[in-house]
Structures are given as C-alpha cells and as structure tokens.
Image: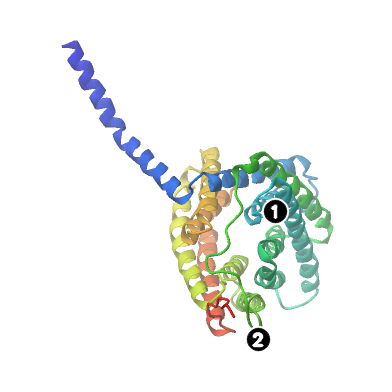
Amino acid sequence: MSIRTTGVGGGQKRAKWRPFSKAATLLVAWLERVDPGTHRRIKGLRLVTAYGIAAMLGAVLEPHQAGIGGALSSLAGGFALWASVSEGQATRAASSRDLLILCAAAAVGAVSMIGIGAMLGLGAWLRPEAALITGAFLVGYLKRFGTLGAGVGSQIYIGQLLAYCAALHLADIATAVLAGVIAAVAAIVPRVLSGPAERPVSLPISGPLELVSPAQGSRELRMGLQAALAAFIIVLLSALFHLEESAWAITACTYVIGASAADTLDRVRRRILGTLVGVPLGLMLMPVAAHASLALWLAAALAMVVYAMALPERYDVACGAYAFTLMVMLTATGERSTQLLAARAWETLLGGAIGLTAAVLVLPLRPQRKTST
C-alpha cells in the first residue's frame, strides 16, 4: 500500500510539472531554431553586460554638477549598448577597433547635438530636436561605407538623441566626451572575453546597396534624404502642434527607411506590430514597479537578449523586445506617467508612417541587384 501511494504521489508530481517541462522544451526548440549555435545569445548577453558596466562606471564617476543629474551614466550606458549592437567583426582586435570608433562617433553625435542645439536656441523658431535631422541623414547616407559606416551613422544619431533627452548644454561637453571613453572600455571588455564564441553579422538578405544611376546619385544618399525630410516634417509638426515626444517620432522615421520602398513598407509593418505588442506588455508591469525593481531590470535584460537574437531576421520581434525594454526601463527609473508613455508609443507610430510616406513619394527606391556583364 505504501509503495502504491508513493507511486501515485510521484505521478501527481510529474503531472504537476509536465506543463512547465513542455514550455521549457518549446522554448529551447525556439532558441535553437532562431539562434543555432548560441552566437546571438552570447552577443545579447554582451550587450547587457556592456550597458551595465558603462552605467555603473558612469554612476561612480558622476561629477554631480548642477544640471547634470544622471547624464553620465545614461550616456555611457547608451553609447556602449548600441555600439555593441552595431559592431559585427569576427576577431577580438577588429571588434575592439570598431567599438572604439563607434563609441567615439556617439560622443561626436552628443557634442554636435549640444552645439547645434545651442545655435537653434538663439532665437530660432525651430526647436532643439531639429538637430536630429542631421543625424537622421547620416544614418542612411553612411551605409555606403559598409557595416562600420552604418554603425557610425547610427551612433552619431544615438549620441544626438541621448544628449537631447538629457537636456545637455555647452557646459556638459566634457560629460559627453567622458561618456564616450567609459562606453569604449565597457563595450570592449565583454567583447574580448566572449572571444571566438561570436560570429560576424551576415550581409543583408537584399544584397548590397548600389548606384541607381550616376545622375540620380547613390541609393544611400537617397535614403539619407528621405530620412532627413521625414525628420524635418516631424519637427514642423512639433512646432505647430507641440508634440510631447517628437524625438521618438524622428527616431522611428529614421530607422524604418529601407533599401527600397517595399523594404520600408515591410519594416514599418513589422515595427508597428512589435510596438503594439511590446508596449502593452511593458505597461502591464507598471503596478509592480515600486515593489520589484530588480525583477524589472532582469526582464529588460532578457528582452535585450531576445532583441539581439531576433534583429537580423525578425525585425518585428526585435522591435517588440525593444519596445518592451524601453517601457520597463522607463518604469524602473521612475517614469510612470501613462500619458507620457502613451505619447511615446503613438508618436513612434506616427514617425513610422511619415517615414513610409517619404520613402514612397520622395525619390522612391526599387529593389535592384547587380547584373553580370
């Protein structure tokens, strides 16, 4: 009798844990399908590590000057995180070189934002976010110089965006430069330790960007012009209707511009889907923010690992993971205004729509591959 009872109890315990075991099996199968060999997972962990090291070093070295707040920590963390995303070399030496260049580009972007913002503040009717137009152009145009060029353009824009969000002034130029130095150290150390466990990023499936014709200029130039025009339209709308989070709309229109109008349409669709899923999931965690801040940071870290895994091939999943991370981090840092978070969400969608319109109507691009002669 005792043996039979034990057997029944054991069967009940196995039945109790069976759903969890099945879920774990499905999760492992999905990970292997999306990321065979664990290379992207390792890169995702590196992104989180670089951000954490940079943010902590920034907090330790924070000068605590008037008007600075936590700018050094947030700048350094952002520089290191997105430099690690853009870097795609195979060796430690090449990766370290690119990470140094990318972090320097982010610092240059932040300094340019401070300078242009100061000039725009001298009585001009344009708001300071108009400086982001230059970064939006470089995101598209510098893709003509390959993976590193695309990363440099993106880092310049990110540096501008972070400096704008931190409301930096001329007196804060040293803070931006120091953030670049901290970010370079924080990004290079995890890459050196990860070593051969990572592989370089693959080339875009659509093939290299090419010249449409000598008279029309390069495809990358047209992409830059499309992004800059879309950003300019958002700046005008912000001046007329006082958009609360126009910088997020500019960011959306900048990064949805693809190598063709069809590619842009696909990216906009995927970005909208990701945003519509990621933002509500992040907002659902707001009630526990005051009681489980550590859990929120862990959830954000896990979402960034998913972002790194999905980015090359599943832009919708990557956008959803990033939108979730953004909402969680804003909540964890004390920003819990539902109105502000909603404004960032809908203005992101607005920016994507304006970017798509610019890609379709202004110097539209068609998919084009080189043909053998």
Residue at the image point whose x is 78% and y is 55% from the top: 176
Q: Nearer the viewer, residue 194 or 306?
A: 194
- Picture coordinates of residue 69, whole percent (x, y): 73, 49
Q: Residue at x 52, y 73 (%)?
A: 264
Using the rendered image of the protein, determine whether residue 332 is visible from the camera's viewpoint.
no
Q: Earlier in the sequence, mark 2 or mark 1?
A: 1
* Residue pointed to by mark 2: 216
The quarter holding residue 220 reads: bottom right
Mark 2 or 1: in front is 2
Tags 2 and 1 in contact by the CB under 8 Å rule?
Answer: no
Q: Residue at x 76, y 51 (%)?
A: 179
Q: Position of residue 223 (x, y in %)?
A: 62, 76
Element at label 2: loop
Tag shown at residue 166: none
Number of dots carrying numbers:
2
Question: Which residue corresponds to mark 1?
Answer: 79
Residue 347 sits in which quadrant? bottom right
Q: Residues within 10 Å of mark 2 (few under 14, many from 20)?
A: few
Q: Quadrant of the C terminus?
A: bottom right
Look at 68% across and 88% down and name the residue there: 215
Q: Nearer the viewer, residue 248 or 82?
A: 82
Residue furthest out toward the front: 373
Horizontal arrangement in the rendering, residue 175 relative to residue 218 (left or right): right
